[in-house]
Image (cartoon, rainbow, N blue to C red):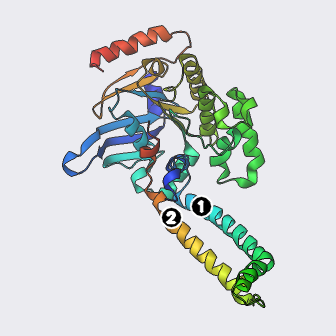
Amino acid sequence: MLIAKDRYSIAVMKAFGFTNSDITAQYVARSVFVLIVGVVLGTLLANTLGEVLVGKVIASFGASSFKFVINPLWAYLLCPLMMVGSVLMATMIGTSGAGKIKISENIKE
Amino acid sequence: MKMMNETKMKKIIIGENIVKSFGVSDEKRNVLDGVSVEINEGEFVSVMGPSGSGKSTLMFALSGMDGVDGGKVAFDGRDLSGLKEKELADLRRTKMGFVFQQPTLLKNLNILDNIILPSMRDNRKNAAKITEKARMLMKKAGISELEKRDITQVSGGQLQRVGICRALMSNPKIIFGDEPTGSLNSKSAQEIMNVFSEINADGTAVMLVTHDANVAARTERIMFMRDGKIVSEMRLSKFSGTDIDDRMKKVTAKMREIGI
């Protein structure tokens, strides 16, 4: 799926001398960028709006003293690392098909 | 004298008995059926033939973009079948240039970035020099004013010039063109052929795949293909720019003679 819509661009890049690992690196860079933006925004929002919003939902059940108890090791290190790991793995698996894209089949007239 | 010059010329491509098949098991068809070809440094060659004759497949095989099922292809003294994917990619990036019928440019980059992209892969530290070279080539190709434009904002002929500039960025030993004028009107096609002639005059070999006799007539050696084989070959003198009618007559006469 990840590379299906980009078959033509990938074939062009390969024709002009880019290797399969160059192409994978490009996708990894894109994914990591999106991930970093997501982690930073997620952390900021969780620490600001998150507690208020979840507190309101919980309060509707009658518990008004809700607050987040943050485990810094998990929240700021282990969880982001796990996300990085899964994104990298998913991207590598998703782009492994780039090597099978034949230049001739995708750009031949 | 001509013979002597030819023997002295270095062969940049040697293809021996190339076989390339498509299809599966019983329905396999040899698109290239034992083709042998040699291209010398600085030559201006064209491959002509009807659709399905195998001419584009030959170009893809000689440039290492496609593997072969039989025979051998050597580029600049290196057997392509022994090279890994990265080595083939390096070879394409540094010693070959490509121009296709469609411009094969990336939509998300502007004209200048499309031209410099392959060169930037190895040489980001020299970005200024690379950009300067791209601008010089764009000026030579008459498209200086287009560098910031999107590829959707220029004409087909201009896009082909962009493709040619990109192909020239690495000072390639050879430029391969697969029907490079196929989607252009006759005026733009003629202008693009003039650019190819200039490139060749500067010493770069050019190999064009075409079904257009007008294009082939401007080259100096024409290989005619049919059913996966080179069935004939003819040589012409250097194109002077004014003798196109005479050359066309020779090419069409040859085509009639061999029945393609």
Query: Which residue is painted at 47% across and 29% down in the image?
Result: B179
- The residues bearing labels 1 and 2 have C-alpha atoms spaced at a distance of 9 Å
Residue B193 occupies which quadrant of the picture?
Answer: top right
Q: Is mark 2 on a helix, strand or loop?
A: helix
| Circles 1, 2 touching at the beta carbon (< 8 Å) | yes
Dot placed on the residue nearer the N-terminal end, 1 or 2: 1
Q: Is residue A23 left or right of residue A102?
A: right
Query: Which image quadrant is residue B242 in?
Result: top right
Query: What residue is shown at x 47% (from left), y 42% (from top)?
Result: A107
Image x and y of residue A47, in percent: 79, 79
Whether residue B84 is visible: no
Which quarter of the figure is the C terminus of chain B placed in?
Answer: top left
Label 2 neighbour load within 10 Å: few <14, some 14-19, many 20+: some
Residue B195, position as x, y percentages in the image: 60, 25
- Residue at numbered disc 2: A94
Instruction: Residue A27: give its label.
Output: 1
Q: What element carries label 1?
A: helix
Task: Identify the subunit bearing mark 1.
Answer: A
Question: How would you rate the neighbour count of disc 1 (Cα within 10 Å): few for under 14, some for 14-19, many for 20 or more?
Answer: some
The tally of labels here is: 2
- Most foreground residue, A1 or A93: A1
Outermost residue, right direction? A48
Q: Which amino acid does label 2 sit on?
A: Gly
User: Can I make out residue B191 in this image?
Assistant: yes
Amino acid type, mark 1: Tyr
Image height check: is B183 above or below B38?
above
**Is A60 drawn above or below residue B141 in the view shown?**
below
Q: Measured from the top left, where is residue B198 in percent x and y?
A: 61, 25
Same chain for the residues under marks 1 and 2 in the image: yes
Percent of width and height locating residue B212: 43, 21
